[in-house]
Image (spheres, grey):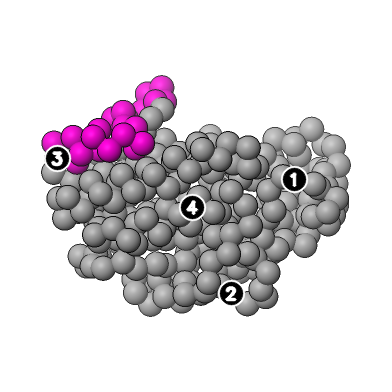
Amino acid sequence: MNVLVTGSNGQLGTELRRLALDSPHHFIFTDINSLPGVETVYLDISDRASIDIIAESEKVDIIVNCAAYTDVERAESEIDMAMLLNHQAVENLAGAAASRDAALIHISTDYVFSGEGNLPIREDAVPAPKGVYGSTKLAGEKALQKSACRSVIVRTSWLYSPYGRNFVKTMRSLMRSGRELKVVYDQLGCPTYAADLADALMHIIHGPRIEGNTIYHYSDEGVVSWYDFAQAIRELSGYDCRVVPCLTGEYPTKARRPHYSVLDKSAIKRAYRLEIPYWRDSLARCIDRMDDGL
């Protein structure tokens, strides 16, 4: 089976590269950007014709879409770019996949919800995004579901890894300076180690043929605030700095963040018999890799 991965030089795509080494399937890793020493096929997913060409030439059976516009704050002022990558590009991928009866595994986000509840969010909860990022990601989901493409949408939250830009890397960089950090404690969710999510995606890829349109939620296990997450990063990294809690209102942003974005993962655990790691255990594994130079 031939599996095409978009956005393969990002956090999740990089972790899929590692796991693909032990897979019996043939993977084609694509991105619009290149990295030194990393074999990457150029692909602009905003160009439908380019997708059709590579899908046909590689006889693609599954597309895994890890590409997205993910800058939540800048999306508020770069609406067209966010819509291009999060909606129109998904429509392009779905059309290309459907034209050759390939399946599309698409990564989405907890930001499609309002975050105003207090119970883990199920897949059938009514979306109500509060900002441009969440709205454009929801538009991509709807475009995929309206298409004739066989698909799986996987919504995730608080993604981090040793690669790219993420909360863990930002906190470690700031903590090395030893200065005091203020982190919000009134936003609750669960971190997702990209390596764990990549493993879940491999279960889907290696699992039964994808039929219809299915949505799953995936994050690591547990519930935590950004403040508690930062404290765990400090402790596991061995940094000597002060981390103090603050309210969301003390840290004004253009984009509104969900106050509660804990995802209910029961469905994906049942479907693929997954044992999802506790968030702090996964954070420890990630920090060990970072300290060891990956």
Do callouts 1 and 3 mark residues in contact (Cβ within 8 Å)? Answer: no
Given the image, on which type of amino acid does mark 1 rest? Answer: Thr
Q: Nearer the viewer, residue 61 or 235?
A: 61
Q: What distance separates the C-alpha of mark 2 from that of mark 3?
A: 41 Å
Q: Picture coordinates of residue 130 (x, y %)?
A: 63, 57
Q: Residue at x 72, y 45 (%)?
A: 254
Describe the element under mark 4 as helix, strand or loop: helix
Q: Which residue is mark 4?
A: 137
Describe the element under mark 1 as helix, strand or loop: loop
Q: Nearer the viewer, residue 76 or 251?
A: 76
Q: What distance separates the C-alpha of mark 4 from that of mark 1?
A: 19 Å
Q: Which residue is mark 3?
A: 56
Q: Picture coordinates of residue 193 (x, y %)?
A: 52, 53
Do callouts 2 and 3 mark residues in contact (Cβ within 8 Å)? Answer: no
Q: Magenta segment: does it hold 53?
A: yes
Q: Residue at x 44, y 41 (%)?
A: 85
Q: Picture coordinates of residue 181 (x, y %)?
A: 82, 44
Q: Residues within 10 Å of mark 4 (few under 14, many from 20)?
A: many
Q: Which residue is mark 1?
A: 253
- Residue 99 seen anywhere in this rendered image of the structure: yes
From the viewer's perspective, is the residue at label 2 or at label 4 nearer? Answer: 4
Q: Which disc is residue 120 wearing?
A: 2
Q: Quadrant of residue 257?
A: bottom right
Q: Residues within 10 Å of mark 2 (few under 14, many from 20)?
A: some
Q: What distance separates the C-alpha of mark 2 from that of mark 4?
A: 20 Å
Left or right: residue 280 compared with residue 250: left
Task: Tell me where the magenta segment starts and ends, as one range.
Answer: 34-57
Relative to 276, residue 159 above or below = above
